[in-house]
Amino acid sequence: MKRIIILTGSELRHKFFCQYIASDDGIKVINSYCEVKKEEPYNDSKNDCNNRLNHFLTRTVSEKDFFQLFVETVEDCSNSIYLNKGEINNTMYIRKIVASKPDLLIAYGCSIIKEPLLSLFSGRFINVHLGLSPYYRGSGTNYWPLVNNEPEYIGATFMYIDSGIDTGEVIHQIRAKCFWGDGPSQIGNRLILDMSKVYKDIINNFDSLKKMPQLPVPLNERFYKRRDYTEDSVLILYKNFYKNLIGKYLIERNDRCKKVPIIKNNTLERTV
C-alpha cells in the first residue's frame, strides 16, 4: 500500500480528487493539505457583462454536476487539513509532512512549492499540470487553447515537481476528450475525472514507472500569466464555441493531434 500526502486546493473539484484517490484500496492518504484561496475580484460594477465572472459561475455549476454527488455520498478518507493559500511552505506544515513519512507527495492545484520540500522528496513528489507541457505553461493552460482555436493542446501532464513552473520531468500525458455540444466547462471537468483515474494508476504503479524521453521545447511555446485573463479573452472563447470550434476540431482531430505529440508511459495499465 502506498502512503501518500496530497497538496491541493479546497474547491469542489479538489475535494472530489482527494476523496477519489483515498477511495482506492491500495492507497492510504495520510493527510490532504487543502489551501483556501481568497475570492477572485472579478465582480466589476463598471462592467455590466462581466464575462470573467459569468465564465466562473458557469464552471461552478458544471463542477456540481460532475463532482458533487460523489463528494456527498462516498466515504471521505482523505483526512483533510485546511490552510490559507501559500501556507503549505510554512515550517509547521513541512515538519508535519516530514514526520508523517509518506512514500509519495501528490500535488494538484496547490501553491508553488519551495525548498526544503522539493529536496526532501526529490523523485517522490509528483505534480499534475492541467495543460500539455511544454506547449502551454503558466496560468489557464487549458483555457488559452480554446481561445486560440487549438483544442488539441488541452490535456493533463503528470511530472516530477521541480523549482520551475511546469518544467519538471514528464511521466505521462493525456489529451482531453471532446464531444459534440461540449462547452469549455464540460471539457475541463471531464478531463479532471480522467486525470484523477490516471493519477491513481501512477500512484499504484509508481515503483515500475519508466523514464520517458522528453519532448523538445517548441519554438512557439506559450506562457500565460493571470493578468492575461481579460474580459475580451472570454468573449473570444465563447465566440469560438458559437462558431462550432469543437465540431471542426472533431472532424480534423486525428490530423491535428498528430502534430502535437504527447508522452505516454506504457507502464500504466489505464489509457485515457
Image: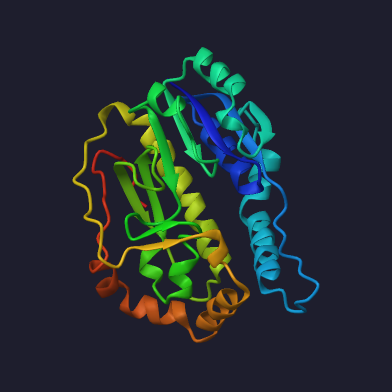
Residue 123 shows in this picture: yes
Q: Where is residue 110 in the image (x, y as percent from the top left)?
A: 55, 41
Q: In this view, does 38 lie above or below 51?
A: above
Residue 256 position by quadrant:
bottom left
Q: In this view, does 201 lie above or below 234?
A: above
Q: Is residue 12 above or below residue 7?
A: below
Q: Position of residue 215 (x, y in %)?
A: 23, 53
For this orientation, the residue located farthest to the bottom is 243
Residue 197 position by quadrant:
top left
| Picture residue at 25% right of the left edge, 65% below the top | 219
| Picture residue at 47% right of the left edge, 72% below the top | 146
Q: How is the image coloured?
A: rainbow
Q: In this view, does 122 lie above or below 163?
A: above
| Picture residue at 23% right of the left edge, 43% below the top | 266
For this orientation, the residue located farthest to the top is 99
- In screen coordinates, is 218 left or right of 35? left
The quarter of the rendered structure image containing the N terminus is top left
In depth, the one of 157 and 97 nearer the eye is 97
Residue 271 shows in this picture: no
Q: Where is residue 15 in the image (x, y as percent from the top left)?
A: 63, 41
For this orientation, the residue located farthest to the right is 45
- In screen coordinates, is 200 left or right of 217? right
In depth, the one of 31 and 187 nearer the eye is 31
Q: Position of residue 111 (x, y in %)?
A: 55, 41
